Image (tube, rainbow, N blue to C red):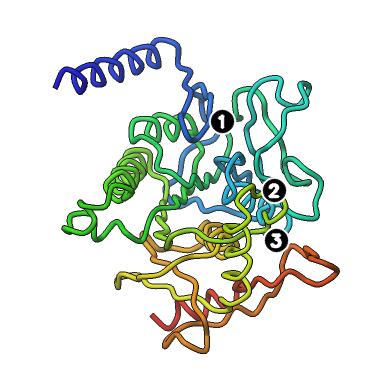
C-alpha cells in the first residue's frame, strides 16, 4: 500500500541520517549513541566479571526501573542508565517510581544524559514493548567491548504463527521475534554472548502508589503475594504470567549464565507441578502499611538448582 511505502521510505531516510551522523535515537530504548572505538584487544573468550558496567534500558518503564534497582543493590555489577539531556537539571520526573523509595533513578545507578560510554560490558534490554530490529542492531554496534546482551522477550513468541496469535490484535509475538533475531544477528556479527528471556505477561511490581489504575494496582499486589515460585525452561514452551520482580532478577542472572533462550513464568507452589521455590521475600524491603511487601524472587542458588534440573 502507499502507507507501507511511505513507512519504508521513512525508515530508509532515518537510517541514512544515522549513518551520516553516527548518532541514533532508539524509540522504546531511549538511547542516543555514537560509535566508539575499543581500547582493548577483543577476545571471544572474555566474560563479564564483578564490577563490570551494565546498562539497563529503559528506566522509564516498570521492568526497567525494577531491574536497575536489582542491579544496584543485588548484583556484583555497576549499573548505568540514560536520561534525556537536561532531565536532572530540569527536575524531570519518571512515570513509575518504586514504592517507599525516593522518586527517580534508584540510588547506586550511574545516570548518563549524554552519549553512553563505549566500554559498557553488558546490556539488558528490559523494554516492555519490542524495539525495532534496526534500532537494536545499530545500538549494539556502538559498544565494541560488549560481552553480553540480555533481551526481555515474550513467552508468546513460539506461538506467533498460530491462528489464535494472529487473530489477537494485542499480540506482539511477531515483533518480539524480530527483536530476538536482531540481537542474535548482532551477537553473531560482533562476537558477544546473548541470552533471550521469554517471560509470561508481566504483572505486579512495587508500583502500587503511583499506579493510576487502582484495580490494576490491586491485582498486581495480589499476584505478587500469591506467586511464591517460578518455572524455567530451556526448550519447553511455558504458559503463564510473570512478576516484574522475578523477571528483573532473571535478566540479571542471565548476564552470567551460558544459555541462549530461556522461558520464565511465575507459579504458585501449592498448585504448580514442577515449580521451583523462591526463597527471597521482599528483596527491596518495601513496607506496605507497616508490613513487608508480599513478593518472592529466586536466590542465585534457586536459579542454579532450577537450571541444573533441566
Residue that carries the numbered disc 1 in the rendered image: 118
Q: Nearer the viewer, mark 2 or mark 1?
A: 2
| Contact flag, marks 2 and 3 (Cβ < 8 Å) | no
Point out the image quarter for the N terminus.
top left
Question: Can you say whether 306 is above or below 152 in the image?
Answer: below
Which residue lies under the disc numbered 2?
210
- The image quadrant of residue 298 is bottom right
The secondary structure type at the circle numbered 1 is: loop
Mark toward the start of the polypeptide (2 vs 1): 1
| Crowd tier of the residue under label 3, counting other residues whose Cα lies within 10 Å: few below 14, some 14–19, many 20 or above | some
Element type where label 2 sits in the image: loop
- Which residue lies most toward the front here? 215
Residue at horizontal 53 percent and vertical 29 percent from the top = 31
Please state the horizontal and vertical placement of residue 210, each as a whole percent of the image. Answer: 69, 48
Residue topped by disc 3: 74
Residue extending farthest left = 1
Q: CA distance from mark 2 to mark 1?
A: 34 Å
Q: Quadrant of the C terminus?
A: bottom left
First in sequence, mark 3 or 1: give its number. Answer: 3
Amino acid at each position: 500500500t502507499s502507507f507501507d511505502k511511505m513507512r519504508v521510505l521513512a525508515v530508509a531516510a532515518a537510517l541514512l541520517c544515522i549513518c551520516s551522523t553516527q548518532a541514533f535515537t532508539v524509540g522504546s530504548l531511549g538511547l542516543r549513541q555514537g560509535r566508539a572505538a575499543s581500547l582493548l584487544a577483543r577476545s571471544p573468550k572474555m566474560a563479564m566479571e564483578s564490577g563490570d558496567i551494565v546498562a539497563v534500558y529503559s528506566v522509564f518503564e516498570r521492568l526497567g526501573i525494577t531491574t536497575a534497582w536489582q542491579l544496584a543493590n543485588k548484583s556484583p555489577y555497576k549499573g548505568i542508565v540514560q536520561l534525556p539531556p537536561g532531565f536532572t537539571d530540569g527536575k524531570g520526573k519518571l512515570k513509575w517510581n518504586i514504592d517507599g523509595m525516593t522518586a527517580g533513578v534508584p540510588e547506586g545507578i550511574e545516570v548518563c544524559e549524554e552519549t553512553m560510554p563505549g566500554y559498557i560490558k553488558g546490556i539488558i534490554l528490559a523494554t516492555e514493548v519490542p524495539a525495532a530490529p534496526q534500532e537494536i542492531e545499530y545500538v549494539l554496534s556502538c559498544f565494541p567491548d560488549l560481552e553480553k546482551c540480555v533481551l526481555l522477550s515474550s513467552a508468546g513468541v513460539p506461538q506467533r504463527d498460530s491462528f489464535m496469535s494472529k487473530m489477537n490484535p494485542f499480540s506482539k509475538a511477531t515483533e518480539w521475534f524480530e527483536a530476538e533475531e536482531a540481537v542474535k544477528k548482532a551477537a553473531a556479527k560482533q562476537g558477544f554472548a546473548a541470552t533471550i528471556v521469554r517471560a509470561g505477561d508481566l504483572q505486579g511490581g512495587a508500583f502500587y502508589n503511583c499506579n493510576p489504575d487502582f484495580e490494576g494496582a490491586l491485582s498486581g499486589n495480589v499476584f505478587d503475594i500469591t506467586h511464591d515460585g517460578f518455572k524455567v525452561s530451556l526448550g519447553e514452551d511455558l504458559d503463564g504470567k510473570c512478576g516484574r520482580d522475578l523477571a528483573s532478577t532473571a535478566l540479571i542472572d542471565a548476564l552470567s549464565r551460558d544459555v541462549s533462550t530461556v522461558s520464565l513464568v511465575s507459579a504458585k507452589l501449592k498448585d504448580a507441578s514442577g515449580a521451583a521455590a523462591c526463597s527471597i521475600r521482599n528483596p527491596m524491603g518495601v513496607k506496605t502499611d507497616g508490613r513487608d511487601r508480599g513478593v518472592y524472587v529466586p536466590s542465585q542458588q534457586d536459579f542454579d538448582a532450577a537450571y541444573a534440573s533441566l
